[in-house]
Image (cartoon, rainbow, N blue to C red):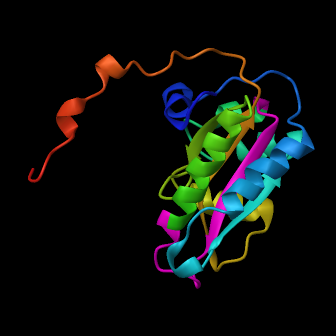
Amino acid sequence: MNSFFELLKTRRSIRSYLNRAVEQDKINIITNAALMSPASKRSNPWEFIVVEDKKTLERLAECRIHGSQFLANSPLGIIVLADTTKSDIWMEDASIASIIMQLQAQDLGLGSCWIQVYGRQKDEKTSTEKYIRGVLNIPSDYAVLNIISIGYPDEERKAYDEANLPIEKIHKEKF
């Protein structure tokens, strides 16, 4: 990558991955980047569960009615959760860590996609979070924000075209 701006332009959600494991050194870089992400008052409420086991990824892929099934064919999923007793803005802190992981993955030549967990349903009776909590034995003081799927892309997505950016959403001085 030439610059951070180029990294942002080329990072797109990838839902199809090659059948190729992500190397441990790359996983370490991605998770270490997340551990360096900013957090309110350095409370660091976020924690991460790295999942490479195919059967577990297949179970996690069933966490939502729509939008998570591709995780079954992902070589790596990182569950982003936070200790809600450490910060009242855990969601913001965990969101920052999540995007940092996605940008780091992109910089390493990997694709990624955010799978929303918080506020979603597995079915009419079970929340996505409750389902994942059961699969991964997550303590009750932790909230699950999302899953970041990561792998070597098996699809190409066009970079953002600066000419098509919604510039009208940028305001100066006043709305």
Residue at the location (53% across, 57% down)?
96
Q: What stretch of residues is rendered in magenta?
A: 73-92
Quadrant of the rendered image containing residue 132:
bottom right
Q: Residue at x 60, y 60 (%)?
A: 129
Q: Is residue 90 left or right of residue 29?
A: left
Name the residue at 68% across, 35% down: 107
Comparing 58 with 42, the one in front is 42
Residue 147 percent across, percent down from the top left: 65, 49
Residue 31 rendering spot, x and y as whole percentages? 76, 55
Q: Is residue 62 visible?
A: no
Residue 47 left/right relative to 168: right
> Is 32 drawn above or below residue 113 in the view shown?
below
Q: Can residue 25 be seen from the camera position used here?
A: yes
The quadrant holding residue 22 is: top right
Q: Residue furthest left?
A: 174
Counting from the top left corner in percent of width and height, residue 126 is at 58, 58
> Residue drawn at (62%, 75%), measured in percent from left and top?
45
Would you say residue 19 sits in the magenta stretch?
no
Name above or below for residue 121 compared with residue 4: below
Q: Quadrant of the N terminus?
A: top right
Q: Report the number of discs.
A: 0
Q: Which residue is outermost to the bottom?
A: 85
Is-magenta flag for residue 87?
Answer: yes
- In percent of width and height, residue 50 lies at 80, 53
